[in-house]
Image (tube, helix red, strand yellow):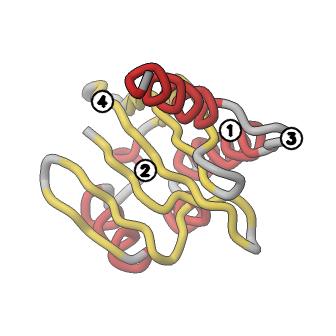
Amino acid sequence: MTSVLVSLACGLVVFGCGHLEGWDGEASVREVMRDQEKAWDRGDIPGFMVGYDEKVCFISPKGSTCGRDSVTARYLRSYPDQRAMGDLEFGIGEVLPAGKDHAWCTGTWKLHRSTDTVAGGFSLLWVRTAQGWRILRDHTY
């Protein structure tokens, strides 16, 4: 009997994490990511960074950087001009609620540049703030 109750509880937790009645985050997250693509393609890193929370941590194979100012500085060093930035393309796989004010988003990214195309994936933890939905954790690979 105990194992049945544990299985039922686990099932409710798993089901509950993927659906939240009245949750409106998916459209907002997708809109912020569209705005980020547009800003990137204009060569506007500060505009791209509007989608990030002040307390963001960016985690990649090269290490971790925390704080929006530090993450912005990292992007500016890595992408010093429009040519290095290229054209950004996100492939959003899914946006799932993680409570009323948080969401997980997974997907892919590609940078189409004149000399090459680089690509990878991401997992983003989003938070709803007074300014709208913002990325709190960015795991990019």
Q: Furthest residue to the left?
A: 62
- The mark that comes first in sequence, 2 or 1, is 1
Residue 121 appears in the picture as rendered: yes
Tell me the kind of residue under disc 3.
Gly
Give the residue number, with chain letter if any, for mark 4. Answer: 120
- The mark that comes first in sequence, 4 or 1, is 1
Q: Nearer the viewer, residue 121 or 105?
A: 105
Give the residue number, with chain letter if any, for mark 3. Answer: 22
- On the rendered structure, is 116 left or right of 109? left
Query: Which labelled disc corresponds to residue 42?
Result: none
Residue 138: give x, y in percent of width and height: 39, 52
Q: Furthest residue to the front?
A: 1
Tell me the kind of residue under disc 4.
Gly
Report, in whole angstroms, how far the alpha carbon at label 4 lies from the one at label 3: 32 Å
- On the rendered structure, is 23 left or right of 78? right
Give the residue number, with chain letter if any, for mark 2. Answer: 82
- The mark that comes first in sequence, 4 or 3, is 3
Residue 92 appears in the picture as rendered: no
Q: Secondary structure at mark 1?
A: helix
Q: Quadrant of residue 141?
A: top left
Residue 24: give x, y in percent of width and height: 81, 43
